[in-house]
Amino acid sequence: SMDLLTGWDFDRSSDRAAASRHIDQQTPLLVIGSPMCTMFSTLQRLQAHDEAWHERLKRATQHMKFAVAMYRRQRRQGRYFLHEHPASTSSWQLPVMQSLMEEPGAQVVTVDQCMCGQTTGDGHAG
């Protein structure tokens, strides 16, 4: 797992480069990307779009671009990727995501996670 909890911070170019090298060296069959979706949430439409908000959106978009670069690397090497993001997020409208979805062989599947047994932290249906 490559995330903040395991010490990876994709705001840092050095961590993005290290992750790229790691994927190249380990050659995983499947890379699963799940960039933070906070800035792409429908709730963001309710936020004031000040300078700080735009900076957070810029960082979030950079993370999406990095994830897509990793996905494309996987595909070029004959391997697979899975991108997990809520269907309602605006990230799907980013040009980088639109172009990825239009690539030959790309498939978009929407899954209702509650139907697969997802629950909240206290065990209730989400």
Image (cartoon, rainbow, N blue to C red):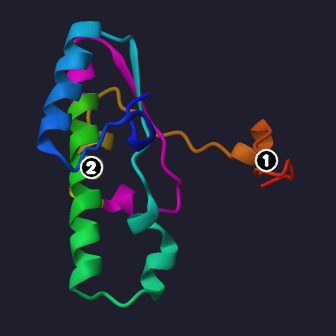
* Quarter of the image that includes the C terminus: bottom right
Give me the residue at 35% from left, 12% from top. Answer: 28
As rendered, which of 90 and 122 lies closer to the eye? Answer: 122
Instruction: Look at 23% across and 27% down and name the residue there.
Output: 19
Residue 15 falls left or right of residue 9: left
Q: Which residue is depicted at the point 39% across and 47% down?
A: 35
Return the x and y of residue 105 as percentages of the image width and height: 34, 26
Element at label 2: helix
Q: Which residue is mark 1?
A: 119
The residue tagged with tag 1: helix, strand or loop?
loop
Viewer-side residue, 76 vs 102: 76
Question: Is residue 19 depicted above or below 33 in this figure?
Answer: above
57 lies left or right of 48? left
Q: What stretch of residues is rendered in magenta? A: 72-93
Q: For residue 2, which quarter of the picture?
A: top left
Residue at the farthest right position: 124
Badge 2 amino acid? His
Residue 117, image x, y percentages:
80, 39
Please tell me the numbered disc located at residue 63: 2
Q: Is residue 77 magenta?
A: yes
The numbered dot on residue 109 is none
Residue type of the residue flagged with mark 1: Thr
Give the quarter of the image for residue 57. Answer: bottom left
Q: Position of residue 84 (x, y in %)?
A: 48, 41
Quick check: marks 2 and 1 in contact, CB under 8 Å? Answer: no
Residue 64 lies, with reference to residue 48, above or below; the image says above
Q: Earlier in the sequence, mark 2 or mark 1?
A: 2
Say few, some or many: other residues with alpha carbon within 10 Å of mark 1 (under 14 / 14 to 19 / 20 or more): few
Q: Position of residue 93 (x, y in %)?
A: 33, 61
Q: Is disc 2 surrounded by few (<14), some (14 to 19) or many (20+) residues within 10 Å? A: some
Residue 121, magenta (yes or no) = no
